[in-house]
Amino acid sequence: MSNPLLHFAGLPKFNEIKPEHVGPAVDSLIAEGRALVEQLAISTEAPTWQNFAVKLEDHSEKLGRSWSQVGHMNAVVNSPELREAYNDNLAKLTDFYGDLSQDERLYAKFKAIQSSAAFTTLSATQQTIINKEVRDFKLGGAELPAEQKARFKAISEALSKLGAKFEENILDNTNDFKHTVDNLADLAGLPQDAIEAAQEAAKVDGKQGYQFSLHFPSYMPVLQYADNRALREVLYRAYATRASELSKPEWDNTALIRDILRLKQEEAHMLGFNNFAELSLATKMADTPKQVTDFLDTLAKRAKPYAQQDMQALTAYAKQLGISDMQAWDVAYVSEKLRQEQYAFSDQEVKQYFPEHKVLAGLFKVTETIFGVHVRKVEAPVWHADASFYEISNSDNQPIAYFYLDLYARNHKRGGAWMDECISRRQRANGVELPVAFLTCNFSAPVGGKPALFTHDEVITMFHEFGHGLHHMLTQVDEYGVSGIKGVEWDAVELPSQFMENFCWEWDVLRQMTAHVDTGAQLPRELFDKMVAAKNFQAGMQMVRQIEFSLFDMRLHGDFDPNGKLTALDLIEQVRDEVAVMRPPRWNRFPNSFSHIFAGGYAAGYYSYKWAEVLSADAYSLFEEMGVLSGEAGTRFKNEVLAKGGSRPAMESFVAFRGREPSLDALLRHSGMAS
């Protein structure tokens, strides 16, 4: 029990976990799991919820909790030793879960519970879990002939390794790139805080001048503000060719893409599906790939005329700036100049009003007002000095959940922003185990003695991830299998996160979370009005870009032949022919860093962002009707959506909250595309 990864009474001991703890912990838990499986499989007792399902669930929770700590640290404080331990043990876990999902004895016992007279006496939540277990055994290969099971398991193990390698290649390439600028004059147009951060980065590396990387807080200001077109091109080219044959060969994801697609197709065929897209949708709200592509085509038809107008305006304005042949590395720069011209403000100006402490206080205030809870910072062991820990309590001041927060970009930390489960809510013998979430972002760290400042886009990201966190933390489901976000259809998972984004556009919310970094003044109403006026600036371009990614993903996992002459790059060019208004250069290698679908669980599921945006916009329209910070609407959302987790279909939860099925109208209205 000296191994911190085998500590289950309370919070993780992040201050004690070392790479050498991983192997022994995983070996111990897998051995325990195999012994339990054998004991349950050979038992002659009639299987019930209590003597069978709960025992498997207990072990699943322990193994999941231990591994979530390893996976999280591998993502946020990556090191060669931790990476090796992670990969070695990921293979062991995949092997264990592969055996588990194909065990016909366990499958038979779940089916026996499902068909027993006692099934009707189980709670609706318990019935849901049993039904999902039966479905997942089928999808895990339990019904395959014996000779195919070994191949199916080998595919699962290979996909697990390939996905981890795909992500590592992007991280290594991102960490490796450094570009130093000697002359301050070459940084004209860049905000002062970006210049200071670049100077600090060079100093840390023992260099003179200003050092830039492909981490977003360093990369994006250059693309958006640097007058130096050559500098923009250098960074864009490096970013757009990450993990491709145009970077270092050892990081090239091209072959991995083919291998992943071949294996997913083979897996789908073995289970009787025509392609992986059909297999993916077997556990989602959407029924068929055609339903998804029809939905995306409908959105594309509405959005493309707006996108074309956006592009015409951008091209014309670029010419005014002396850029007659606008390229991909000019788009963010010209867009920012055009927005400043049209709306008389810049992202940089707005950023000065969003210091970290005010943003967090504002986020917590919204949460407290509409959901009737309280958020406060408390102490707990963490993995890095940047990370912090918070408690959520109810109106009686009783703790109901906790979360870790790790906001800043740094080397050896995966890019992007995400929420993950640390501990899930469930009923135990000694009471209810409270849920704990990980909330991770990659924002600019404090620089020059000032607090960290967030762009408005980053504020939106913060609200988005917190929405995911609330889905996990405000659940009232006590059964592990469908507690929080577990068991929620993937295309509904983004509902609470995108719902929370809406508050970032409300004056009564936003003004409370602003204080100018130098003067302390609140965001002026005039500036806010300009932001709102600019909210749908290039909304058409942004929507067709998301549709491009979603269609590419669905087709890649649909009729695309991974063994044919057509490559993933060819396919995305075909999709762009249909929907894109801005064409990146031929050497752009976007698929090679599209980790969402190759390493992040979004394969044939990237459309979920747009699908759930329909739900979230429509859900938010009730708050627009009842009052933006309506406690009554908030209580309904908490009780019918957040509290229910995966215990019932997402559409049932939506209808219970909204009183009807969702409509496209609110999304199109929010995006400035209502007819």
Image (tube, helix red, strand yellow):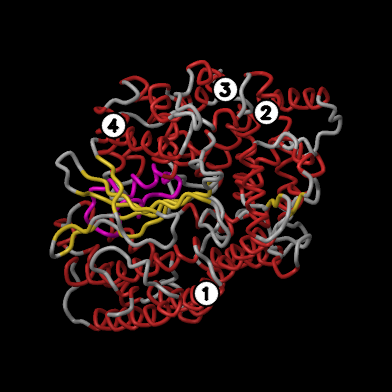
Q: Is residue 346 above or below residue 5?
A: above
Q: Which residue is mark 1?
A: 87
Q: Amino acid at mark 4?
A: Ile
Q: Within 10 Å of the Cα at label 4, are there few (<14), some (14-19), or many (20+) other Cα atoms? A: many
Q: Within 10 Å of the Cα at label 3, are there few (<14), some (14-19), or many (20+) other Cα atoms? A: some
Q: Which residue is mark 4?
A: 370
In the rendered structure, find residue 673 and report the number of the disc placed on it.
3
Q: Amino acid at mark 3?
A: Met
Residue 322 picture quarter:
top right
- Write down the region rendered in magenta: 466-493
Q: Is residue 443 above or below residue 35?
A: above
In the rendered structure, find residue 492 and report the number of the disc placed on it.
none
- Report whether 392 appears left or right of 238: left
Q: Amino acid at mark 2?
A: Ala
The local secondary structure at tag 4 comes to helix
- Report whether 263 appears left or right of 132: right
